[in-house]
Image (spheres, rainbow, N blue to C red):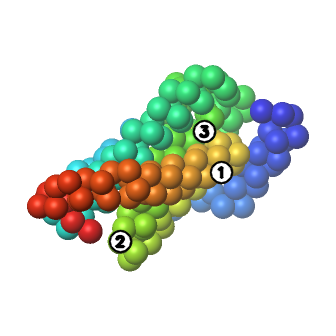
Amino acid sequence: MPEPIQTIDFSILDWIQEHICCDALDRIVPKLTVLGDKGIIWILLALVCLAVKKWRKCGISMAFALIVGLLIGNILLKLTIARDRPCWIAPPNVMLIPIPKDTSFPSCHSLSGFAAAVTLLLYHRYPGMIAVLLSTTIALTRLYLYVHFPSDVLVGTLLGIGIAIAVYFLTKKYLWSPMQKKFPALLIYD
């Protein structure tokens, strides 16, 4: 990343360390961040949606969005950009979680969280709003824990939102409409 961006990133992280960090959050935040590890909570949510007949389209779209996010974020961008994590460059006094071994950009906790949450929001408004709140909370834990730069989280969030919207419209146009015309009795419902 260009030097000015990293300077701004560190100033935000240092502000969080100085003004937000406290013993109560130090106990809670590591537990919250685990919810986003390997996208497990979002994969489980997609599976639940797949299991419920009237939420099946959402579950299929969510699974597609998570797979696209994995390919773009974890495979393409992380390996191509290979940005060091802030805790590798300037470790804080205390690390509250084990130091991650993979690179920093983009935040795939943010990417997978927003890909799944926004997909849910597009299909089911109120549960989607709760999921967006959870994905936002998980994304912010990555800053608190000093394992991602704010720009990593921002780009992961924007990618997740973009992927969710793209998958939603592409599946609607190229999957649901043609499929329902050919197979009207198919067990996929709105």
Q: Residues within 10 Å of mark 2 (few under 14, many from 20)?
A: some
Relative to the observer, which residue lies in front, 127 or 13?
127
**Residue annotated with mark 3:** 106
Seen in the picture, residue 177 relative to 90 is either above or below; the reply is below
For the point 33% across and 51% down, the residue is: 175
Ranked by sequence position, the earlier of labels 1 and 3 is 3
For the point 47% across and 41% down, the residue is: 69
Relative to the observer, which residue lies in front, 86 or 174?
174
Look at label 1 and name its amino acid.
Leu
User: Is any part of residue 80 visible from this angle?
Assistant: yes
User: Is any part of residue 145 visible from this angle?
Assistant: no
Quadrant of the image for the C terminus?
A: bottom left
Circles 2 and 1: CB distance less than 8 Å? Answer: no
x and y, in percent, of residue 28 in the image = 45, 57
Seen in the picture, residue 121 relative to 105 is either above or below; the reply is below
For the point 72% across and 61% down, the residue is: 19
x and y, in percent, of residue 51 in the image = 16, 56
Secondary structure of residue under mark 2? loop
Label annotation for residue 69: none
Q: Residue furthest bottom?
A: 126
Look at label 2 and name its amino acid.
His
**Residue annotated with mark 2:** 124
x and y, in percent, of residue 127 in the image = 35, 72
